[in-house]
Image: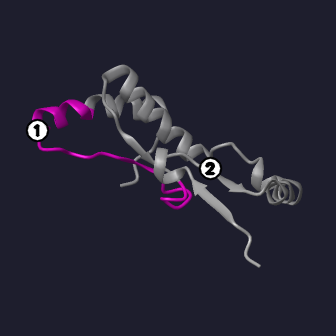
Amino acid sequence: MRLPVIERTLAKAIGVMGSDIAADQRIVDVIRSYAPGFIFTTSLSPVPVKAKRIGDALLAEYGVHVQPINYPTAQHGTERLRFTQGAAHTREMMRELTGPLVEIWNRLDMHLAA
């Protein structure tokens, strides 16, 4: 007999960690009872938190949206920000992003990878 369980991840949809399941109430109760560490671990690791803080600061302070790439899309410790250049972005706009990005990066005591 197959048990219908639908599992969804939030990582690709909204760029955060987490997931949920949809199933018969008894199945959900069993998972909740026997896997509490899986169900109730909700804190983000420090690297995604900093990536999110950088993205939030860029948006709030400079009006620039940057999508963080967090686990499980990126391996733990390799979380990053996704910058997507579009046809409407000019070289000047890209240069204008550099100053705010460096300022926020330094404010959060982040180190450059290369």
Left/right of residue 73 with respect to residue 26 in the rendered view: left
Q: What is the spatial separation of the Cα atoms under label 2 and label 1, in whole angstroms?
A: 37 Å
Q: Which residue is mark 2?
A: 18
**From the viewer's perspective, is residue 41 above or below residue 64?**
below
What secondary structure is marked by label 1? helix
Residue drawn at x 48%, y 59% is: 74
Q: Which residue is mark 1?
A: 91
Location of residue 44 in the rendering, given as x and y in whole percent from the top left corner? 63, 44
First of labels 2, 1 by sequence position: 2
Amino acid beneath label 2:
Gly
Q: Which mark is residue 51?
A: none
Left/right of residue 108 with respect to residue 113 in the rendered view: right
Q: Quadrant of the N terminus?
A: bottom right
Location of residue 91 in the rendering, given as x and y in whole percent from the top left corner? 11, 38
Q: Is label 2 or label 1 in front?
A: 2
Residue drawn at x 34%, y 34% is: 65
Residue that extends furthest to the front in the rendered view of this protein = 1
Residue drawn at x 14%, y 38% is: 89
Label 2 Cα crowd, 10 Å radius (few <14 / some 14-19 / many 20+): some
Nearer to me, 33 or 61: 33
Left/right of residue 10 with respect to residue 112 in the rendered view: right
Where are the magenta residues, as a range? 71-98
The dominant secondary structure in magenta is loop
